[in-house]
Amino acid sequence: MSDEIERNSRALIGALIEVYETLRLICTGLPIPITLPKQETEFDGAITIQAVSRLVEIIEDQPIREFEKAMIWGASLQWLSANKLISRYLNYSADQVSRMEIELLIQHSGDALIAYLEGEEETDTP
């Protein structure tokens, strides 16, 4: 693997982990808390994919506003898509288009979670 591909891979995985951690923290603060596994040492894609897939299935049961459910649901699906594309990027072509697709999905996922958090702050103030 070339140095550039390795740097890009580390950056993509780091961004994916950052968004996952934000999602994990949001889920612990839901009215019915959802526990996503914390990544203690190395990032385990199989465990996180399974956990986030389950989140997509059960977020509808949360007693929160519909647009909040939609933000978490959409962010989760984008995160899952980015995670799956990283495998293609690492194992096959490591092409620039794949990298950009992953970056876009991670950015949109993170933006949705930030919007969720900002909306939550607005409703907490009198």
Image (cartoon, helix red, strand yellow):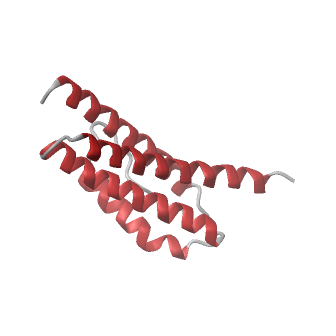
Which image quadrant for residue 53? bottom left
Which image quadrant for residue 19? top left
Quadrant, the N terminus: top left
Residue 105 lies, in percent from the top left, at 40, 51
Residue 37 makes an appearance in the image: yes
The residue lying at 20 percent from left, 49 percent from top is: 87
Residue 42 lies, in percent from the top left, at 27, 38
Going by the picture, which residue comes out furthest to the bottom? 61
- Name the residue nearer the viewer: 62 or 117: 117
The residue lying at 55 percent from left, 54 percent from top is: 112
Going by the picture, which residue comes out furthest to the front? 97
Query: In the figure, 3 relative to 97: above or below?
Result: above
Which image quadrant for residue 21? top left
Going by the picture, which residue comes out furthest to the right? 126
Query: In the figure, 110 relative to 15: above or below?
Result: below
Residue 101 lies, in percent from the top left, at 34, 49
